[in-house]
Amino acid sequence: MAPAGRPYLDRSRAIVSRDQLLLAFQYMADYLYGQGVNLTIYVAGGAVNTIYLRSRHSTGDVDFFGSNEQSRQLKDASKYAQRHSESQFRANWFNNSMSLFLGRAMEQDLIGASHHQNAILFGKSGLTVYGVPWEYALCGKTDRLTKPNKRPYDTADAVAYLCKCVDPSAAY
């Protein structure tokens, strides 16, 4: 088990650093811009902790949601980034599995709250990446802490989200 507040390195998952994620987003943005589109996605989990909060050194994947119309373009862009990156991204490093748990109304509420919160992880022509609201992230993490599949870093992640809920302007 990792010390409190330190990332847990699960060797069965590809580990991706902040710099590797940002470079992958840059590749995706370049691809999308080349296709003549500018897309916005909303990210939860380890990517937020790694890029925005810097409370972890790495993550295994990027969990996002966005409009269904964007799915094909985002999949193509993520494959482009995977091919052009020197990093070892696993096949599903960029996934929208969290969309399965969101109804359309909830998704729209989260989009509005994400824009209001304005936690931008990445923003370039072609791609903008927002973090989901801190309250939503905290609820999801707190729920996972009650389950058998909790991970050693979940408590530290929850603390980071709680700090932002209490004082959004505070640096973690």
Image: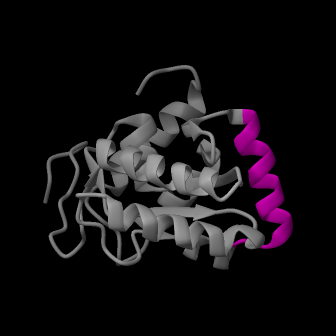
Task: State the image coordinates of residue 129 (x, y, percent, origin top left).
Answer: 59, 46
Q: Is residue 93 visible?
A: yes
The answer to whether residue 69 is left or right of residue 84 is: right
Residue in the foreground of this view, choosing between 49 and 168: 49
Q: Quadrant of the N terminus?
A: bottom left
Task: State the image coordinates of residue 96 (x, y, percent, origin top left).
Answer: 57, 71
Give the overall secondary structure of the magenta segment: helix
Task: State the image coordinates of residue 100 (x, y, percent, origin top left).
Answer: 65, 79
Whether 13 is drawn above or below 54: the answer is below
Q: Quadrant of residue 15?
A: bottom left
Q: Quadrant of the C terminus?
A: top left
Picture colour scheme? one colour
The magenta stretch spans which residues?
A: 102-116
Residue in the foreground of this view, choosing between 114 and 136: 114
Is residue 103 found inside the magenta-colored segment of the image? yes
Q: Residue at x 62, y 49 (%)?
A: 132
Q: Give the mark count.
A: 0
Q: Quadrant of residue 5?
A: top left
Task: State the image coordinates of residue 99 (x, y, percent, origin top left).
Answer: 65, 73
The answer to whether residue 43 is left or right of residue 93 is: right
Residue in the foreground of this view, choosing between 34 and 122: 34
Q: Residue at x 45, y 37 (%)?
A: 52
Whether 92 is drawn above or below 107: the answer is below
The answer to whether residue 85 is left or right of residue 48 is: left
The answer to whether residue 103 is left or right of residue 52 is: right
Q: Residue at x 69, y 34 (%)?
A: 117
Q: Residue at x 20, y 57 (%)?
A: 8
Q: Is residue 158 visible?
A: no
Is residue 74 found inside the magenta-colored segment of the image? no
